[in-house]
Image: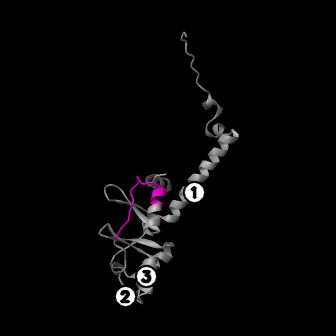
Amino acid sequence: MKVGEFIKKNGPQKIISVKPTDTVISAIRIFSDHDVSSTLVISNNSVVGVFSEGDYARNIILKGRSSKNTLICDVMCDKIIYVTPEYGLKQCLAIMALQKVNHIPVFNNNENLLAFISMKDAATALLEEKEDLVIELTRYITGSYASSLHSAKDLQPLFRTTHSSY
């Protein structure tokens, strides 16, 4: 399954974001309110970074900084790893694993943000796709595959007789 197909299948997604000038505590509240662990950082309708729970742990907690007084722009990751709709979901998951990120933005060729995909959602979609394949193969093996696809009327075969002399 392609990333673009995944986006279409799941419908429009509400993008949760913060501004670079927001405080870290405001982002943590957003994480809690929306049950997410990462958010895009958007300025002037453009993605300028990503802020995650990992960034919070590494840059605030471990360094003894105040989440009330620290701005997102001071601790966000400004190296934006992304994919386009043409990428496969398996490829997308591999990129997330290699880059050690749990979420990845999807941009189209015009650099418009389309989605922010989580590793969990991508993996779930791939598992569902595999489950569907197992069901189809089971139907095929047991002989119920064709009848599950069409009505009996739709399954009338076409025959062609050739009249050639040998």
Name the N-terminal-most of marks 3 and 2: 3
**160 to the left or right of 91:** right
Residue 97 higher or lower than 139, as above or below? below
Determine contact: label 3, label 1, CB under 8 Å.
no
Find out whether residue 87 is within the magenta segment. yes
Q: Which mark is residue 127?
A: 1
Q: Which residue lies furthest to the front in this view?
A: 166
The magenta stretch is: 79-93
* Local crowd size for mark 2, using a 10 Å CA cut-off: few (<14), some (14–19), many (≥20): few
Residue 59: quadrant of the picture: bottom left
Q: Which of 94 and 155 is in front in this view?
A: 94
**Three-letter code, disc 1:** Leu
Q: Residue 25 carries which label?
A: none
Name the N-terminal-most of marks 3 and 1: 3
**Three-letter code, disc 2:** Asn
| Residue 14 x/y as whole percent | 44, 64
Disc 3 target residue: 58
Q: Which residue lies furthest to the right in this view?
A: 142
